């Protein structure tokens, strides 16, 4: 159920479903997704579904993780990356193989504590986890070549846009009831937005939860 063969079948399916970035696919082939999910659900880890991860949150489906990763990478290696919404840390672990360093912010303290232990066990070192409201960004560690938001929001606050490097991009689900993946790119003229396929995410919430 959780073997390398099951994972390879997931990769073949993602390729069939249009994921074209082979670097993303090969990284997803090395990360054991079942270790990010509660034991009772681990046998479903490689199905193309999102699954519950406690505290009312969900791990994104393999297709969403692959799609957002390929959009963020845009066919070149990433330098400094910011993730908002660490959750179980699966997307974080993938990004850590695609970028020089990944800063990831989660608002639910106890969820982040579990994720910290999990990522430490997997010996992923180039990540920095922070318990905070992610929509304020992390200006002291920016600017970022890529920002990824794994919960849906109607708009990006200026404080976050300002932490994007020139030539960098933000990938996030935009909307409220109807949601679409969206890319905002920063160039010398300003910010350019592109709206892509329809998706379904849990919402961005403000403030932090301590216990
Ligand atoms: N990439 C994660 C997705 C988790 S769901 C995974 O695959 O596991 C979205 C996550 O965003 C949740 O863990 C939620 O607590 C977090 N989140 C929501 N609003 C946030 C905010 N303002 N700052 C930081 N994290 C936030």
Image (tube, rainbow, N blue to C red):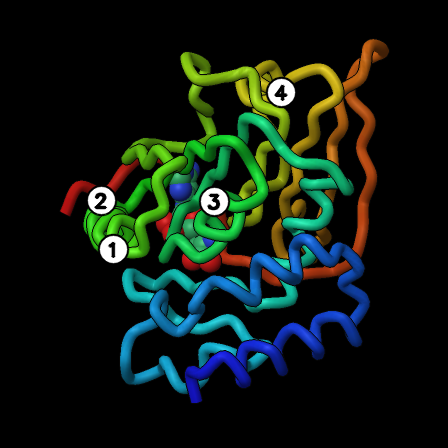
| Residue 121 circle label | 1
- Please tell me whether mark 2 or mark 4 is closer to you in this view: 4
Looking at the image, is 67 positioned above or below residue 113? below
Characterize the local packing of mark 2: few (<14), some (14-19) or many (20 or more) Cα atoms within 10 angstroms: some
Q: Nearer the viewer, residue 121 or 14?
A: 121
Q: Which residue is mark 3?
A: 204
Instruction: Determine whether, in the image, residue 25 is placed left or right of residue 91.
Output: right
Instruction: Please tell me whether mark 4 sits on a helix, a strand or a loop.
Output: strand
Q: Quadrant of residue 190?
A: top right
Q: Residue at x 75, y 21 (%)?
A: 167
Q: Residue at x 60, y 14 (%)?
A: 162
Which of disc 3 and disc 1 is earlier in sequence? 1
Instruction: Please tell me whether mark 1 sits on a helix, a strand or a loop.
Output: helix
**From mark 2 to mark 4, how far is it between C-alphas?**
26 Å
**From mark 4 to mark 3, how far is it between C-alphas?**
19 Å
Which of disc 1 and disc 2 is earlier in sequence? 2
Looking at the image, is 22 positioned above or below residue 6? above
| Residue 164 circle label | 4
Q: Which residue is mark 2?
A: 109
Q: Nearer the viewer, residue 15 or 3?
A: 3
Q: Position of residue 71 (x, y in %)?
A: 73, 46
Characterize the local packing of mark 1: few (<14), some (14-19) or many (20 or more) Cα atoms within 10 angstroms: few
Q: Are the residues tagged 4 and 3 within 8 Å (C-beta)?
A: no
Instruction: Please tell me whether mark 3 sits on a helix, a strand or a loop.
Output: loop
- Please tell me whether mark 1 or mark 3 is closer to you in this view: 1
Q: Is mark 3 within 8 Å of ligand 1?
A: yes
**From mark 1 to mark 3, how far is it between C-alphas?**
28 Å
Looking at the image, is 195 positioned above or below residue 51? above
Can residue 205 be seen here? no
């Amino acid at each position: 159920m959780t073997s390398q063969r099951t994972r390879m079948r997931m990769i073949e399916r993602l390729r069939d479903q249009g994921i074209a970035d082979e670097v993303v696919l090969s990284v997803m082939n090395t990360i054991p997704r079942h270790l990010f999910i509660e034991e009772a659900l681990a046998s479903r880890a490689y199905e193309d579904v999102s699954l519950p991860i406690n505290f009312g949150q969900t791990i994104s489906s393999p297709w969403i993780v692959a799609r957002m990763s390929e959009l963020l990478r845009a066919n070149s290696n990433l330098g400094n990356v910011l993730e908002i919404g660490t959750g179980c840390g699966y997307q974080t672990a993938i990004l850590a193989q695609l970028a020089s360093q990944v800063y990831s912010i989660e608002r639910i303290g106890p969820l982040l504590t579990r994720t910290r232990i999990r990522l430490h066990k997997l010996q992923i070192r180039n990540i920095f986890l922070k318990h905070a409201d992610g929509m304020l960004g992390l200006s002291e560690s920016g600017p970022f070549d890529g920002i990824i938001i794994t919960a849906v929001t109607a708009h990006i606050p200026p404080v976050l846009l300002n932490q994007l490097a020139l030539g960098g991009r933000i990938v996030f689900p935009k909307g409220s009831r109807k949601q679409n993946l969206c890319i905002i790119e920063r160039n010398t003229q300003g910010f350019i937005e592109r709206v892509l396929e329809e998706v379904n995410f849990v919402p961005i919430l403000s403030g932090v939860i301590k216990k």
